[in-house]
Image (cartoon, grey):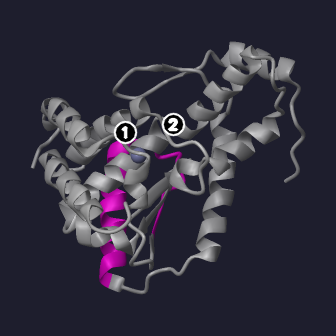
Amino acid sequence: MARKGLPAAGLAAALLLSGGATTPYTHRRQLMVVSEADEDQMGEQAYQDVLKKSKISRDAEATALVRRVGARIAKAAEKPEFHWQFTLIDEPKTVNAFCLPGGRVAIYTGILPITKDENGLAVVMGHEVAHALARHGAERISDDYFAQKALGVLVQGRSEITQAVVGQAYGIGLALPFGRKQESEADHIGLILMAKAGYDPRGAVPFWQRMADAKGGGSPPVFLSSHPSDKQRIERIQEQLPEALAYYKP
Ligand SMILES: [Zn+2]
């Protein structure tokens, strides 16, 4: 569907009416100039683009595992209006995963030796779903929009903004990685989601240690490159664990 750019004044008015957004669980106020409907549509488009270019795994067992963990985390996310999809992409050298707006998840086979088991996969799934749930991509665009507007540099149309959501799409081909605050928040919310789904959130600590070890040899995994330092991350996760454990009913 063709979209027309919206004049900046209209966008500002839309923002005033919508009043921004608030993250789940962490209750952080966000600037938000991208509607959930736009985010969802662009998420679908980007997901189809990625899937078209990717080799989908034919490993029935691993695919079933990804879907099972995904379905459990999705249930915990309490977003029935999302368009949940879980795809395993056959790329043994790609240590990565992402979740696009609307709950469209891709896991690369390269991360599976590090997730090791179902609980480890739930750490990654929780983290990625948390980015979508907290609308981090749309927030990033919104922050950039206001920063640029404050400088008087740019008047962006809405279609460009939504395009940029895809460009920065939660880990693929992105120019700007998520900020540290968003990464830590995705860890935090991810621990809660996995705990609600019946997975032990304490598994996040050994998972991130394995990621750090994997980074030790060869090139750094993509999944880590935009993420905070391992030591700092594990410390934060340890601080976040008691809250998440309150949701854990094994
Ligand atoms: Zn992340």
Magenta stretch, main secondary structure, is helix
| Dot 1 beta carbon under 8 Å from ligand 1 | yes
Question: Which residue sits at x=50%, y=80%?
Answer: 56
- The amino acid type found where label 1 is placed reads Ala
Q: Is residue 77 magenta?
A: yes
**Residue at label 2?**
136
The amino acid beneath tag 2 is His
Return the x and y of residue 143 as percentages of the image width and height. 61, 25
Quickly name the residue at label 1.
Answer: 186
Q: Is residue 163 magenta?
A: no
Image position of 122 (left or right of 154):
left
* In the image, residue 190 above or below residue 99: above
Q: Is residue 28 above or below residue 198?
A: above
Image coordinates of residue 168 in percent, x first then y, are: 61, 47
Answer with the quarter of the image where residue 138 lies.
top right
Q: Earlier in the sequence, mark 1 or mark 2?
A: 2
Pointer 1 and pointer 2: residues touching (CB < 8 Å)? yes
Question: In the image, what residue occupies the spot 56% across and 40% down?
Answer: 137
Q: Quadrant of residue 58?
A: bottom left
Query: What is the spatial separation of the Cα atoms under label 1 and label 2, in whole angstroms?
Result: 9 Å
Instruction: Report helix, strand or loop for mark 2.
Output: helix
> Residue visible at 60% across and 56% down?
173
At mark 1, the secondary structure is helix
Q: Nearer the viewer, residue 244 or 237?
A: 237
Quick check: 58 left or right of 100?
A: left
